[in-house]
Image (tube, rainbow, N blue to C red):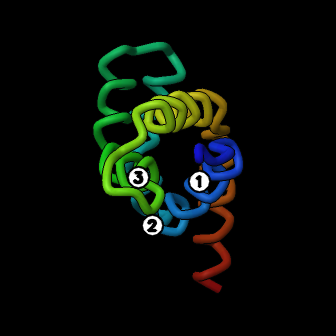
Amino acid sequence: AWRNSLDHYQEFVIIVALDLKIEEIDTLVPIILAVQEDNDDAVSLMLELFDRDIDYEAKYGQRRIDPDLKQELQIKLIYITKHFDVQKHLAQRSQNLGQKKI
């Protein structure tokens, strides 16, 4: 039976967020900005960087990757990337670094 991929996608987002340390997110900022400017190479790179995670989630306990779910996860990844507030992230990052120095 095909599962509700939107609910499963929320789980995927949590797993990816837990897998990424804040420093790794910072290295993605230039790619995120390029994706937000509709740079096709950046979109391809973002999909490539998360391909292993997407494949893992698209299997969802099965032996093979569900191609429909994989495509949906890729679309959602790009959607989230396009709507990621880089300035807010950088401000929070700066604030967190300032608190650690105290």
Q: Quadrant of the C terminus?
A: bottom right
Q: Position of residue 10 (x, y in %)?
A: 67, 52
Q: Nearer the viewer, residue 10 or 89?
A: 10
Residue 13 visible in this rendered orientation of the protein: yes
Please tell me whether mark 1 sits on a helix, a strand or a loop: helix
Earlier along the polypeptide chain: callout 2 or callout 3?
A: 2
Q: Residue at x 54, y 31 (%)?
A: 72
Please tell me whether mark 3 sits on a helix, a strand or a loop: helix
Q: CA distance from mark 1 to mark 2?
A: 10 Å
Q: Position of residue 34 (x, y in %)?
A: 43, 24
Q: Position of residue 47 (x, y in %)?
A: 36, 34
Q: Nearer the viewer, residue 38 or 73?
A: 73
Q: Can you say whether 96 is above or below 26 in the image?
A: below
Q: Are marks 1 and 3 in contact (CB under 8 Å)?
A: no
Q: Residue at x 46, y 24 (%)?
A: 35
Which of the 4 quarters of the picture holds residue 6? top right
Amino acid marked by disc 1: Val
Earlier along the polypeptide chain: callout 1 or callout 2?
A: 1
- Disc 2: CA contacts within 10 A as few (<14), some (14-19) or many (>=20): few
Please tell me whether mark 2 sits on a helix, a strand or a loop: helix
Residue extending farthest to the front is 1
Residue 50 visible in this rendered orientation of the protein: no
Q: Which residue is mark 1?
A: 13
Q: Residue at x 67, y 38 (%)?
A: 85
Q: Which residue is mark 3?
A: 59
Q: Which residue is mark 2?
A: 19
Amino acid marked by disc 3: Lys
Q: Is residue 15 left or right of residue 58?
A: right
Q: CA distance from mark 1 to mark 3?
A: 15 Å
Q: Position of residue 91 (x, y in %)?
A: 67, 52
